[in-house]
Amino acid sequence: MAFNIGEQKYPQLATFWRIQEEKDNYSIVSLGTSSKDKEKNWHNSGWGYCRFVGGANKDLDTLKEGDKIVIVSGKIDRDSWVDQEGKKQYPKNEKITIFSWEKYVPDSSARTGMDAPPVVETNEDEEDAPF
């Protein structure tokens, strides 16, 4: 699964689940994302260890379980490190860092999938109308 981060035509929406750990300058957060495949089937992904840093760490307390957010900027990496024995090590999972997010507000001007009702023309001069 892909985790899109950054400004784009279709921004990455995510569902906020919970704060797992809070520190002074960052928090570890659980998120969920969804995407459709070519056959129009939905696939969900869980992201259990997203690090919210800087401005993204502020205002997390305003979110409740199930709230939708838009991820404005962040990064995914698998940076290696050298252990105490001098061996290069790689993380088991991706490291997701979120720098900025906004609370998702649905566009009220967007179509809801409902068509407008048909326009019915009436002719009040017709005497033989059935009603």
Image: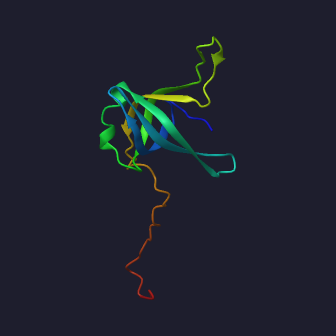
Residue at (44, 86) in percent of width and height: 129
Q: Relative to 64, say whether 56 is above or below.
A: above
Measured from the top left, where is residue 93 in percent x and y?
A: 60, 31
Measured from the top left, where is residue 37 in percent x and y?
A: 66, 46
Q: Relative to 90, say whether 93 is above or below.
A: below
Residue at (38, 80) in percent of width and height: 125
What count of labels does the image hold?
A: 0
Measured from the top left, where is residue 26 in percent x and y?
A: 38, 28
Q: Relative to 127, say whether 115 is above or below.
A: above
Residue at (45, 34) in percent of width and height: 71
Image-based side of 61 in relation to 38, left or right: left
Q: Relative to 70, say whether 36 is above or below.
A: below
Q: Nearer the viewer, residue 117 or 58?
A: 58
Is residue 11 something one can see in this rendering? no
Is residue 87 something one can see in this rendering? yes
Residue at (69, 50) in percent of width and height: 39
**Residue 123's quadrant in the figure?**
bottom left
Q: Nearer the viewer, residue 5 or 23?
A: 23
Specify the farthest residue to the right.
39
